[in-house]
């Protein structure tokens, strides 16, 4: 699930208890943010989205340092509101 809001940007893969910080400074994230804003009714609302990307090292400063790694998203698809069947 993806959650976006100022300054928060996190992703939690289905079935994974860990939550990762998302690098928002990519062109793909700008496109994803536009789509996210069309789907949600309020900031920080979780959505289901399939992503392709790479995990980078944990940040050493700032809010991102509270997360185990930084996810750099390179592609996305299937963005939809979160529901009980999203990860099935």
Image (cartoon, helix red, strand yellow):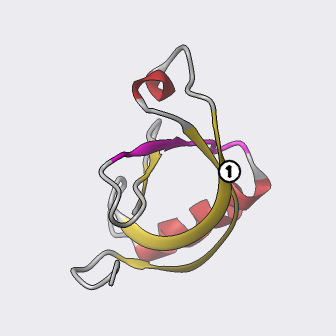
Residue 23 image-quadrant placement = top right
Identify whether 20 is placed above or below 48.
above
- Residue 57 sits above or below residue 38 on the image: above
Q: Is residue 2 above or below residue 17?
A: below
Q: Residue 21 lies in magenta, yes or no?
A: yes
The answer to which of 80 and 21 lies nearer the viewer is 21
Residue drawn 46% across and 33% down?
A: 68
Q: Which of the image's four quarters has the C terminus?
A: bottom left
Give x and y (percent) for residue 70. Answer: 58, 38
Q: With 55 as the anchor, is 12 left or right in this view?
A: left
Horizontal and vertical percent for residue 19? 38, 46
Residue receiving disc 1: 54
Q: Is residue 28 above or below residue 50?
A: above
Image quarter of the N terminus: bottom left
Whole-percent x, y for residue 7 in the image: 47, 35
Q: Residues within 10 Å of mark 1 (few under 14, many from 20)?
A: few
Q: Is residue 6 left or right of residue 18?
A: right
Look at 57% across and 23% down and name the residue there: 59
Where residue 44 sits: x, y (%)? Answer: 35, 53
Residue drawn at point x = 55 percent, y = 27 percent: 58
Which residue occupies the extreme top position in the image? 61
* Residue farthest along the right direction in this orientation: 27
Q: Secondary structure at mark 1?
A: strand
Main SS, magenta residues: loop
Q: Nearer the viewer, residue 78 or 87?
A: 87
Q: Classify residue 49 as left or right of residue 16.
A: right
Q: Which residues are magenta?
A: 18-25
Q: Residue at x 71, y 42 (%)?
A: 25
Membership of 35 in magenta stretch: no
Q: Number of numbered discs present?
A: 1
């Amino acid at each position: 699930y993806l959650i976006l809001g100022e300054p928060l940007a996190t992703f939690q893969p289905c079935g994974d208890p860990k939550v990762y910080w998302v690098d928002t400074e990519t062109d793909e994230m700008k496109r994803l943010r536009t789509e996210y804003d069309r789907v949600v009714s309020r900031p920080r609302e979780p959505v289901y989205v399939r992503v392709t990307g790479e995990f980078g090292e944990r940040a050493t400063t700032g809010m991102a340092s509270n997360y185990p790694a930084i996810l750099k998203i390179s592609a996305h698809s299937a963005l939809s509101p979160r529901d009980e069947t999203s990860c099935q």
